[in-house]
Amino acid sequence: MQILREAKSSRFLYSFWQLRQSLLSRLEPALKAHHDLSLAELFLLHSLLSQDCNNPSELIERLGIPAHGISRKLEALERRGLILRQLDKEDKRKRHISITAKGETLLAESFHTLDSEVGDLLSVLNEQDLDMFLQLLDKLTSNSASSSSNV
């Protein structure tokens, strides 16, 4: 396979996988224990708070979660009083989703947990290295987003 012959690509993919696994093994249990949230639910709430996503199809596109997964997560968040789902005033076939004050509070508390867990992981980098890493990560993700939108 071509990818296995590319030393830099293999190194990147392996390191990315290891970092992802490390983050998930830290974040998922901490969020579940302290806030009864999954990482996907946290990003869903955050997308609603930023108000650039307010219906299921936008959330599916933004977060890359399958439609059935979004439905289950929205139902669970609504039962907990963290979001409101209402019929769209202009198109009754659509639903408008918004975060509640309770959801905003839980989201803020959850980000404190994330900061602590991720901060521990990033503490191996000095300030200059961390700034450089974040700039490079932004560059990679913005390039990835523009590439995928051209497909």
Image: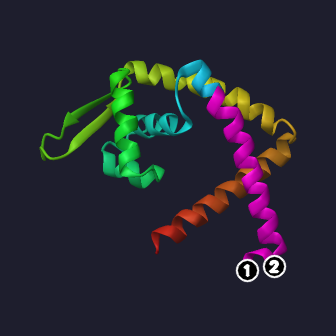
Magenta region: which residues?
A: 1-29
Q: Secondary structure at mark 2?
A: helix
The image position of residue 94, as x and y in percent, is 19, 46
- Image: 18 above or below 73: below
Q: Secondary structure at mark 1?
A: loop
Whether residue 52 appears in this view of the structure is no
> Which residue type carries mark 1?
Met
- Which residue corresponds to the image point at 70% horizontal and 37% vertical from the top-left? 25
- Image: 134 above or below 4: above
Estimate how packed mark 2 is, as few (under 14), some (14 to 19) or many (20 or more) residues with alpha carbons within 10 Å: few
The image position of residue 113, as x and y in percent, is 65, 25
The image position of residue 111, as x and y in percent, is 59, 28
User: Circle 1 is placed at which residue position?
Assistant: 1
> Which residue type carries mark 2?
Arg
User: Circle 2 is placed at which residue position?
Assistant: 5
- Which residue corresponds to the image point at 34% horizontal and 41% vertical from the top-left? 71
